Image: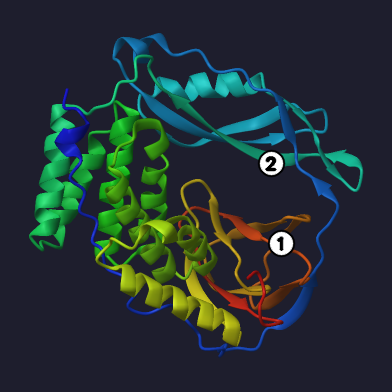
Amino acid sequence: MNLIKSIARISVSAGVIATLALSNGVIAEPVQAEIVEIEAFTPAKPMKKKNPRYPITAQRKRAEGWVVLNYMVDPNGVPYEIEATAHAGHPSFVDAAKKAAMGYRYEPAYFNGTPIHTGAATRISFRLAGDIVGARRKFSNSYRAFFDLLESGVDGQPLHDAMHDLKQLGISFLYEDAFVSIASAAYAERLGDYESAQASLSHALRYQQDFELFSAKRYTHLQAQLFSLQARAGNLADALHTWAAIEPRIKDLEEAEKLHQAVTKIKSLQAEGADFSATGTVSDHYRYSRKLLASAFSFADVDGDLAESKLYCDQGFLGFAIKPDVRYDVRNDYENCSLVVIGDPGTTFTITEHWSEVGRNT
């Protein structure tokens, strides 16, 4: 088994914002204003979540992995319609996770004081004891082969095939999942798919706390890259959130000046109250999410099916059906709002954030 230092060479490009996806305050078609009021909603809270049994077949193969479950919770706090929307590692993990979720119990969600049915999700990691940190040799070789092609400037089918070969290996250890995500981020960035790139890189960086995959300097560099990808994808509130985490540590980075310029551009946009747009894609988990920087938003150019949207703010929660070309204004006294869009995987749309007053969510 190759340990951490053998594949710690990460080369996600360090490009910083070329252009932001701005509409410069101009919307192609007028949209109808619709004021969104946050309702008195209390989400379901877990009361009993017992860990699943580690499947014997996976344990014998020394396999690790994870499963994402989506399910409903009834007014009695009992999960139903349990579905694995994503997973990695040995296939036996899916059944083990579902069986565990059948035993979960929740304090139900309440709407205006009445218990209701609501959706919930959980991610279950299957990790072997002993703090195994490493990768299979064939995984390490495939990972290096992909980055050798990427760094040499190869595009097209050869790079696609190398990415496909790496993913086809699957993961045996969670450590490998982190590096598949690093490669996926680099590949998506090369294709200009900044939304997918930032999602993959964000997923990889979550493993830092578990494995300390990167040196402090490399981790800061990758966080700076995440900021760049979020900004290019038009996820400006997420970008500012990442910036707040890395600002004290970027002075030694070569791209520090460009990062400061990018932040200045975002904050100028915010101060001017200029609308901005981004292309969204519903993931394999049936959802798309973003933090809101402005106080209003609208959807257009929907290709596929969007079922509903959920708005989470510090003051409450609201679920509503999505209507294209309708502008939704959120009250200015509601803060730190995040938007979750539920729909069919692969559905694309344009989301535009509008400003009803300058200085929203500063």
Q: Which residue: 45% across, 80% down? A: 265
Q: Nearer the viewer, mark 1 or mark 2?
A: 2
Question: Which residue is under mark 2?
Answer: 119
Q: Nearer the viewer, residue 99 or 2?
A: 2
On the question of residue 281 being in view, the answer is no
What percent of the width, then of the height, locates residue 129?
Answer: 38, 14
Residue for point 82% across, 33% down: 75
Hey, what amino acid is under mark 1? Answer: Ala
Query: Residue 82 at x, y = what percent?
Result: 61, 31
**Residue highlighted by disc 1:** 321
- Check the picture and name the quadrant holding the N terminus: top left
Q: Residue at x 27, y 41 (%)?
A: 179
- Cα–Cα span, label 1 and label 2: 15 Å
Disc 2 marks a residue whose amino acid type is Gly
In this view, 184 is above or below 37: above
Q: Position of residue 169 (x, y in %)?
A: 23, 34
The residue furthest right is 113
| Above or below 153: residue 182 | above
Q: SS for tag 1?
A: loop
Is residue 112 or residue 230 the one in the foreground? 230
